[in-house]
């Protein structure tokens, strides 16, 4: 038997340790703004520790704990610590990226580890973003990525929906083998296919063109879309489709009027996932695109990674590439 107070004490100690580690090192500077931000960070860390301890206190029953009750408390504690830890892994680099994008060159040279924010500069904080669109053609990169991603989604759905439906509903020779082999393409690393793709696109004149990118991106997204949609189609009740066929609807009409409306949640999830793949893809864009007017966002950000370009412009470009897809993902979920 383990006492309730001891479990709470250990839980509070563990959360306090993790929160304390998160509180140190985010801001390392001696100016007043940085000290304020650092103090706020420590207050948040203490709040996490106190909140975690309180949560454990509410979960754990009063009095002595049995073995199973203690294990449940420990599992909940580890889950809370995991949430805090992995959230910090994502948010801290994003915080550093955003704060760096608001700096100017003199501030970065003076103290590159000062991640505080000087609100007195007003709209001057967004100087790096304005310069990106004015001097580095980031508006073109943004439009190219949006166009390519949207077209990739439509092409992927156009092929994957009928393909997944055929695998899930129709009976034909080799159906099981085809269903199991859909994801075999992912067993071959893209870097292995990079040179053949480059040679083929160079010989056919598709290199350095948005049309070539739109052709090759669905090759990487259709297999995963097929895999995701066929599982969802198999879960739909077949009686509804059979009733539609008995009422005189053709197979295509059944898919359009019955299957697709019932599959909208899965189609939306697949569309979001495909959009994220196309938006974030870098290797093929870096290999096939040389004309700056045809760069995607990831290719354009790579061109900013130069000693001649200030670091705040690189961070601002990364923020521009990250925020839209993050908003789309959070909004879609």
Image (cartoon, grey):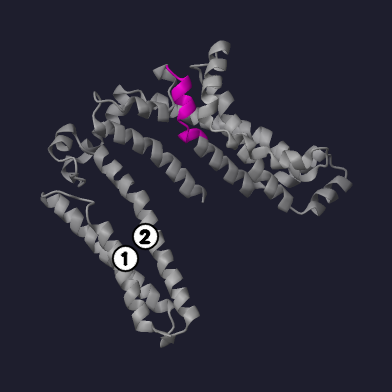
Labels 2 and 1 touching (C-beta < 8 A):
yes
Look at the numbered disc 2 and give the secondary structure of its residue: helix
Residue 221 screen position, x and y as percent? 59, 35
Left or right of 223 in this view: 287 = left
Left or right of 298 in this view: 109 = left
Left or right of 202 in this view: 314 = left
Which residue range is magenta in the image? 278-290
Give the overall secondary structure of the magenta segment: helix
Q: Is residue 322 above or below residue 30?
A: above
Q: Which residue is mark 2?
A: 84
Q: Is residue 198 visible?
A: yes
| Crowding at mark 2 (Cα within 10 Å: few <14, some 14-19, many 20+) | some
| Viewer-proximal residue among 27 and 161 | 27
Q: Which residue is mark 1?
A: 48
| Crowding at mark 1 (Cα within 10 Å: few <14, some 14-19, many 20+) | many
Residue 64 screen position, x and y as percent? 42, 87
Q: Is residue 144 above or below residue 78?
A: above
Residue at far bottom of view: 63
């Amino acid at each position: 038997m383990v006492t309730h107070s001891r479990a709470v004490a250990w839980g509070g100690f563990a959360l306090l340790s993790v929160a304390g580690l998160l509180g140190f090192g985010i801001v390392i500077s001696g100016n007043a703004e940085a000290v304020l931000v650092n103090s706020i960070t420590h207050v948040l860390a203490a709040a996490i520790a106190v909140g975690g301890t309180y949560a454990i206190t509410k979960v754990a029953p009063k009095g002595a704990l049995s073995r199973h009750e203690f294990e449940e408390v420990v599992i909940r504690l580890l889950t809370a610590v995991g949430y805090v830890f992995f959230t910090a892994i994502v948010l801290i680099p994003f915080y550093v990226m955003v704060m760096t994008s608001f700096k100017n060159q003199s501030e970065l040279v003076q103290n590159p580890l000062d991640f505080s924010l000087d609100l007195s500069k007003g709209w001057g904080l967004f100087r790096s973003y304005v310069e990106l669109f004015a001097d580095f053609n980031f508006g073109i990169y943004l439009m190219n990525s949006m166009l390519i991603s949207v077209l990739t989604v439509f092409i992927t759905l156009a092929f994957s929906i009928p393909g997944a439906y055929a695998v899930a509903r129709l009976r034909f020779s080799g159906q099981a083998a085809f269903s199991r082999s859909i994801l075999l393409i992912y067993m071959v690393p893209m870097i292995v296919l990079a040179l053949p793709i480059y040679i083929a696109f160079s010989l056919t004149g598709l290199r350095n063109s948005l049309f070539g990118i739109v052709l090759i991106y669905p090759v990487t997204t259709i297999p995963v879309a097929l895999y995701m949609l066929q599982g969802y189609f198999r879960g739909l009740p077949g009686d509804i489709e059979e009733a539609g066929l008995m009422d005189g609807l053709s197979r295509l009409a059944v898919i359009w009027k019955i299957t697709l409306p019932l599959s909208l949640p899965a189609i939306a999830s697949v569309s979001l996932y495909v959009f994220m793949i196309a938006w974030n893809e870098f290797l093929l864009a870096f290999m096939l695109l040389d004309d700056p007017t045809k760069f995607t966002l990831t290719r354009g950000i790579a061109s900013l990674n130069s000693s001649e370009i200030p670091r705040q412009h690189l961070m601002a470009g990364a923020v521009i590439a990250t925020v839209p897809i993050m908003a789309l993902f959070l909004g879609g979920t």
